[in-house]
């Protein structure tokens, strides 16, 4: 119970991944939290497309495919975190990242894009921004594996 209330850890938005915070600062400071979420999603999508050289896919489908454990194919590179040691942990990390990406785009980005009359509360928006920051970090830190 010591970590609840005023003594609890706090999140400084400026420590979020730069693709996320750098893309939303202006919107955030003017209280446009819903638009900021959309901009964060677009920034990650653009960085992912550029890193993989895949502009024909986007958002949930792009990231799900990028973290897939399927071997890369021509025109379909994959993200990899570390060397494939054949472990369940390696597989879980990639499958989990793909599921997480589908989740943030489906459960956060999609409703925000379609519920134009609903503004987010700042604390809810910060939680969602943190989720996008995690995804941005995983994309940024991943190696790109291409087909032989």
Image (cartoon, rainbow, N blue to C red):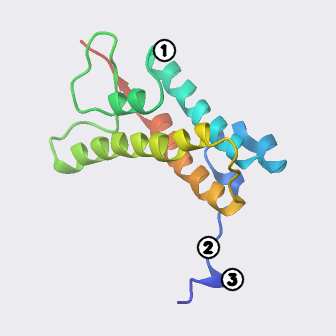
Judging depth in this view, the residue of 111 and 21 nearest the camera is: 111
Label 2 close to label 1 by CB (< 8 Å): no
**Residue 24 visible in the picture:** yes
The residue located at (57%, 25%) in the rendering is 46
Mark 2, secondary structure of its residue: loop
Total marks drawn? Answer: 3
Name the disc covering residue 140, or none: none
Mark 3, secondary structure of its residue: helix
The residue that mark 3 highlights is 6
> What is the x, y in percent for residue 97?
36, 43
> What is the x, y in percent for residue 8?
62, 78
Q: Residues within 10 Å of mark 2 (few under 14, many from 20)?
A: few
> What is the x, y in percent for residue 22?
71, 39
Front disc: 2 or 1: 1
**Residue 21 visible in the picture:** no
> What is the x, y in percent for residue 91?
22, 43
Label 1 close to label 3 by CB (< 8 Å): no
Mark 1, secondary structure of its residue: loop
The residue that mark 1 highlights is 55
Of labels 2 and 1, earlier in sequence is: 2
The residue that mark 2 highlights is 9
Q: Residues within 10 Å of mark 3 (few under 14, many from 20)?
A: few
Q: CA distance from mark 1 to mark 3?
A: 45 Å
Q: Is residue 127 above or below residue 59?
A: below
Q: Residues within 10 Å of mark 1 (few under 14, many from 20)?
A: few
Position of 3 with respect to 79 (left or right) is right
Position of 119 with respect to 99 (left or right) is right
């Amino acid at each position: 119970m010591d970590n609840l209330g005023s003594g609890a850890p706090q999140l400084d938005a400026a420590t979020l991944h730069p693709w996320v915070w750098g893309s939303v600062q202006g919107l955030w400071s003017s209280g446009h939290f819903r638009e900021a979420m959309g901009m964060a999603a677009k920034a990650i999508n653009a960085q992912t497309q550029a890193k993989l050289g895949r502009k024909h896919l986007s958002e949930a489908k792009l990231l799900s495919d990028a973290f897939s454990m399927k071997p890369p194919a021509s025109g379909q590179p994959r993200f990899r975190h570390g060397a494939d040691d054949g472990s369940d942990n390696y597989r879980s990390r990639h499958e989990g990242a793909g599921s997480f990406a589908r989740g943030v785009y489906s459960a956060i980005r999609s409703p925000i894009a379609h519920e134009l009359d609903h503004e987010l509360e700042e604390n809810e928006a910060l939680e969602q921004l943190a989720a996008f920051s995690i995804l941005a970090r995983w994309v940024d830190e991943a190696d790109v594996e291409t087909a032989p």
